[in-house]
Structures are given as structure tokens and as C-alpha cells.
Image: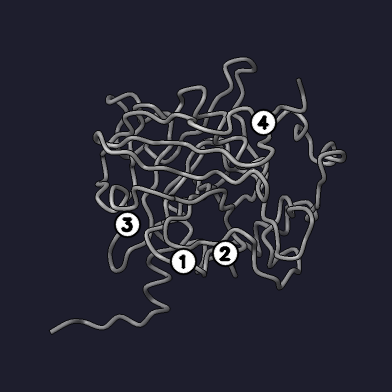
Amino acid sequence: MRLKIPQFLVVLIIVGTLILGSCSTQQSVSNSSPTSAATAASNNSSAETTTNTATTEAISVSENTNESIPGMKDLPRLEGKATVVMTVKGSPITIEVDGTDAPITAGNFVDLVQRGVYDGLVFHRVVRQPQPFVVQGGDPQSKDPKVPASRLGTGSFTDPKTGKIRYIPLEIKPKGSDQPIYSKTLKTAGIDKPPVLQHKQGAVAMARSQMPDSASSQFYFALADLGFLDGDYAVFGNVTNGMDVVNKIQQGDRIDSAKVTKGAENLKNAGQ
């Protein structure tokens, strides 16, 4: 006999898991993973209301006006698309990274791949129960096997040139818009249109804390259609081949390597 769990409880449980995940020591909450996202989803009415009160107004920023957000001009930007092949336990996962609709988020990911940041990192959060949710990884701390499992999900990428953590703004492009909205969820920005890049099965998105501009290096794969996360978390790509590999990932599995196989020339840095 199967126990039937009301769907709203499932969402609460899942989102709660998401938020517990990717916390950064310099952010007031953890780098909310899709697990945290679930928590985020259910917490969004309360958590986001609190968080967004302290956030700046949503900004639609074009390439020529990116000075509106401090540090934006120095962030990597992907102009167009790129292909990344991530290998896990000897099997490849092909990811199409979309810089057309998420230039900063996609540029950040491709830049980290080219730096070799993801090589050897652990998938520290895998949520498949009570229903398929997410596989999350990308915490630089996980490269060191001596780091306690309890700390995984709290790390971010530190730029070796500056010695500072690199955060990127929340970036979501609504359908029908020419530019993404930055630093706010679509709901808090007062936008009722769905995002161009949605949480379909195989979507790749950035984990963050309750603070909108707290994403750094942690990312997650959506194991199912997760529409309740749309507009709250930044999707920047999708799995085009190897979803069967993603579905087999277990907590503790490591990324063998991640390589840009196409579109590396599309990575730009307006600050250079």
C-alpha cells in the first residue's frame, strides 16, 4: 500500500532541501540549491519577501549599460551558445549553454569550466525522493576529500587574481523581453510572464542562497519538470545528451572533467 503525499507537501519538502544546500559563508543563508530551491519555492512567499525587501530594484541591463550593477562589466559573458561535455564516472553528459538568453550566468559557467574549477568536484546533493528533483554540485571545497560532508554546499569560487569570491547577479529573461531582468525574481519584479529558459527535465541552473545575487559556482541538473522554480532561479542551459548518466549520479560521485567542446570563442569579458 502506497502512502499518498499531498503535492504541496512534496513541494515544501523538496524546496526545503534545496535551500539547505548551497550556503556561502559570506551570505546570510546557504547557496540555495534546487533542493534549497524547493525550500525556496515554498519559502519564497516568506523568505523572498524578506530577502527582496533588502534587494535593489530589478534592473534590465544591456551590454552597453551593464555598469548599472557593480562589477557587471568585469564578469565573463557568453555571446551566443557553447557546448560543455562533463564526464562523470567515465560517462559523458553534453550540456548546451545558452548565452543568448543568460549571457552572464552562462559566461560564468563556461569560464569556470575553462579554468578547470569543476574537475574533481563532488555532487554533494542528490534528491530523488519523494519525487525526482535535482542533482547538485560545484562546491570548490569538495575537491578536498578531507573537507567534512557537512560543509559541502557552503562554498563558492574565489578568483585567484582578486582573492575574492565571485558572485553573479540573478539573471532571468522573461518571454517577450529583449534583455534579462537582474537582481530580482520575476515575481518580485512584478513580471507575470514566464522565463524563456525554464526548469524542464535536463535543465541546468545556478544554485544560490535566499539573496538573489549570491550564485557563484554551484549548479544543479533538474531531474524532472520543476515549473515551480521558474522565475526564481537562473537556468542557463540544458542536457542534450547523457540524461541517463545524470539519472544515475549518486551523492558523493565526482566530476571526472568538464570541457568546452564548442563555442569557446563566444566567451567574452567586457572588462578586459
Residue 180: mark: none
Q: Is there a contact, CB below 8 Å, between mark 1 and mark 3?
A: no
Q: Amino acid at mark 2?
A: Asp
Q: What is the CA distance from the residue labelled 4 to the residue labelled 2? A: 24 Å
Camera-nearest label, 2 or 3: 2
Secondary structure of the residue carrying tag 1 is: loop
Q: At 45% across and 23% down in the image, what residue appears?
A: 116
Q: Is there a contact, CB below 8 Å, between mark 2 and mark 3?
A: no
Q: What is the CA distance from the residue labelled 1 to the residue labelled 3? A: 13 Å
Q: What is the CA distance from the residue labelled 2 to the residue labelled 3? A: 18 Å
Q: At 48% across and 40% down in the image, what residue appears?
A: 218
Q: What is the CA distance from the residue labelled 4 to the residue labelled 1? A: 28 Å
Q: Is there a contact, CB below 8 Å, between mark 4 and mark 1?
A: no
**Given the current orientation, which residue lies at the most extreme front position?**
262
Q: Amino acid at mark 4?
A: Pro
Secondary structure of the residue carrying tag 3 is: strand
The numbered mark, 3 or 4, whose residue comes first in the sequence reads 4
Q: What is the CA distance from the residue labelled 3 to the residue labelled 4? A: 30 Å
Crowding at dot 1, Cα within 10 Å, few <14 / some 14-19 / many 20+, comes out as many
Residue pointed to by mark 2: 230
Residue pointed to by mark 3: 127
Q: Residue 96: percent from the left, percent from the top?
A: 51, 45
